[in-house]
Image: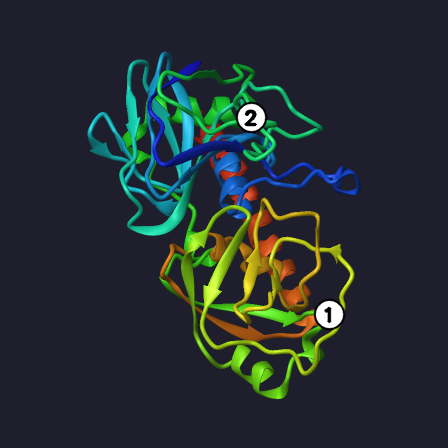
Amino acid sequence: MSVKVLHPGLMTTIQDLGRFGSQKFGVIVSGAMDPLSLRIANLLVGNGEGEGALEVTLLGPTLEFDRDGLIAITGGYLQPMIDGEAVPMWRPILIRKGSILQFKSAIKGCRAYVAFAGGIDVPASMGSKSTYLRAAIGGYLGRALQNGDVFDCVGNYSTVSQSLIQQLEKRPSSFTWSVNYPEFINLNRTQTIRVIQGAEFKRFDAASQEAFFSKPYTLTTQADRMGYRLEGETIRLSEKFELLSEGVTYGTIQVPSNGQPIILMADRQTTGGYPKIGQVISADLPSLAQLQPNSMILFEEVSLEQAEIELLKQEQQLRKVATGIRIKALFEREDKGR
């Protein structure tokens, strides 16, 4: 199956779970801003969780399909339609030859993900299909999609993909289940984001420490895949000190000299020299990625142990979803085929 881009949207790129193992050479991880939505989208079409998919930001693309196929749309709500009719999210969708998938602007959340059964057929760069725009590597020619681009999807469907397609072809009206996404991500414009103390937390004065966990911050328009600049209570160090650049990761919260925090995101640099006041817990990164500019953030302190518990709970829920999809695909087909 080939997909033609009739309109690219604001920024549509191919992303997977990231480019690991090369940070020591200065190559960033990149990958999906909301990895949980990407993983669920892939599960819904029978792919491996880390397969490449489209990441659609704020204003979505218009795509034309030259053959029948199976897709799933997850993440933020960007008003998806097929041939002018609203289409459900968080469930498998059978799309027909000649159909046009169109997105509008984001109503809830910031980023949607579109997975294709079999995956997107683009070469991996350093082990990943993820697009890193600043270095022009990965994805579709190392860039965002443009008008007239055509990309292919792999035709080698998994057993789950084949079963889902058969069910949708035979009983489309009875196929009504979907993933209960509020269990995984928050799409509200005001969010409480949980944070553990950063390495330099105690170097900030007492008033700043208290303000960081009690005052709201606004996500400015200077928010992209590299970092989120916040605006709110000024954070100050107790005294000036020199900090060598050291490793940073997704969700690291740095404080530059102006005292306004920056949250590092998927396309973050590999090292940073600003003091780190906090680290967003892994379980809250998907919700953080769905915030639109001008949204409000409240930070809540949690322990490292609690952060680990929340991540384990999230992964356990995801395993239940994966098992449920396989049961729906394989066992329901066998039951109804008798």
Residue 166 occupies quadrant: top left
> Circle 2 sits on which residue?
142
275 in relation to 101, above or below? below
- Percent across and percent down for residue 230 are 47, 64
Nearer to me, 203 or 173: 203
Q: Is the residue 314 above or below the residue 334 in the image?
A: below
Q: Is residue 184 visible?
A: no
Is residue 89 rendered to the left or right of residue 124? left
Q: Are marks 2 and 1 in contact (CB under 8 Å)?
A: no
Which residue is the site of mark 1? 199
Image quadrant where one finds the C terminus: top left
Amino acid under disc 2: Gly
Q: Please state the horizontal and vertical placement of residue 260, each as a whole percent of the image.
A: 52, 68
- Horizontal side of residue 13 vs 171, given as left or right: right
Pointer 2 local density, CA inside 10 Å: few below 14, some 14–19, many at least 20: some
Relative placement, left or right, of 8 versus 133 is left
Q: Residue at horizontal 78%, vertical 61%? A: 244
Hey, what amino acid is under mark 1? Ala
